[in-house]
Amino acid sequence: MYINITQNETGNNKGSSGQLVTYLEKENRVAEKLNQPEYWFNQDRNNIQPYDVRYTIDNNVAKLSKDETKFFLINISPSEKEISYLKQQYGEDGAKQQLKQYANQVMNDYALNFKRNNINGNKDLVYFGKLENHRYYTYKDEEVKNGHVKKGDQKPGEQMHIQIIVSRKDVSNTIKLSPLNNSRGKNQAHSLKVGQFDRTAFKQSAEKRFDKTFVYERELNETFKYANALKNGDYEQRLEMKEIEQEENIRKQQLKEQQIKREQQKQAMQQRHHQYELKPGRW
């Protein structure tokens, strides 16, 4: 599970959300021809039109100056393994609906992570989610640079993910909420006033929620803790993760060998029983 919070995929979140909304409608410009558009959603509705998204986000900006951030973009991207698991459990359309419901739960955790008075869940946020079925190559990808594919071509494999535009202001249009704020405040009371957001805790909670909601058995190398330790940890932390991974691989190999042994024993017993049934004079 990959979750990222950015200011804006199109580069500007200090003005209107219109450019970003239009960008995230790219798949609908094809789907509408087939009468299969993918609507925006939040905790209340599943059929929200793009103009409603833009109007609501752009008008929830009370007392924000022209140079202040107006909204953020949250990217919720399951791995190919996770997407395949959802499709096996719920089918193609069912997996999409389940992922949307999961995204609303993630936004509930997002709200609680601020630890702010009067911010008690996703109902206190202004946000809109958009499910996308594909990802596309950009000029940053090595495949484009090497001339193997063109910019805008679809990437292969399972690429279903969700993009969420969330307002800087809460639903009352009075409280500023920034997930990029690293401040913890001078003390607990001050933290509650200025807001605090632990992005590591948020990503870990989203991962745990996925596993609990869908009964998904996550391996060590799929965890945020593992990836974060290898990328940002010191030598001791990276070494610890590698040792744990090695121990887990040994344990899995032992379980596999035990399973094979049990299967072989079962087959041998069935074969002996079959031979006993076929003995002359048995009946």
Image (tube, helix red, strand yellow):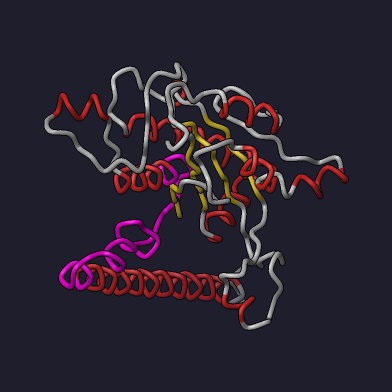
Q: Is residue 142 left or right of residue 125?
A: right
Residue closer to the observer: 131 or 219: 131
Q: Quadrant of residue 222?
A: bottom left
Task: Identify the residue at image location x=41%, y=69%.
Answer: 259
Task: Identify the residue at image location x=54%, y=37%.
Answer: 15
Residue closer to the observer: 73 or 272: 73
Q: Position of residue 202 (x, y in %)?
A: 34, 42
> Of all residues shown, which one is farthest toward the front?
66
Report how many numbered discs are placed on residues in the image.
Answer: 0
Q: Position of residue 45 (x, y in %)?
A: 63, 24
Task: Identify the residue at image location x=45%, y=48%.
Answer: 6
Task: Identify the residue at image location x=45%, y=34%.
Answer: 107
Q: Position of residue 55 (x, y in %)?
A: 63, 26
In the rendered image, which quarter contains the N terminus? bottom left
Q: Is residue 138 left or right of residue 208?
A: right
What is the span of residues highlighted in magenta in the rendered image? 210-239
Q: Is residue 93 left or right of residue 61?
A: right
Q: Is residue 25 above or below residue 251?
A: above
Q: Tell me, yes or no, whether the highlighted magenta stretch contains residue 243.
A: no
Q: Quadrant of residue 249?
A: bottom left
Q: Position of residue 229 (x, y in %)?
A: 27, 64
In the rendered image, which quarter contains the C terminus? bottom right
Q: Tell me, yes or no, whether the highlighted magenta stretch contains residue 230.
A: yes
Q: Is residue 202 above or below residue 282?
A: above
- Secondary structure mostly seen in the magenta stretch: helix
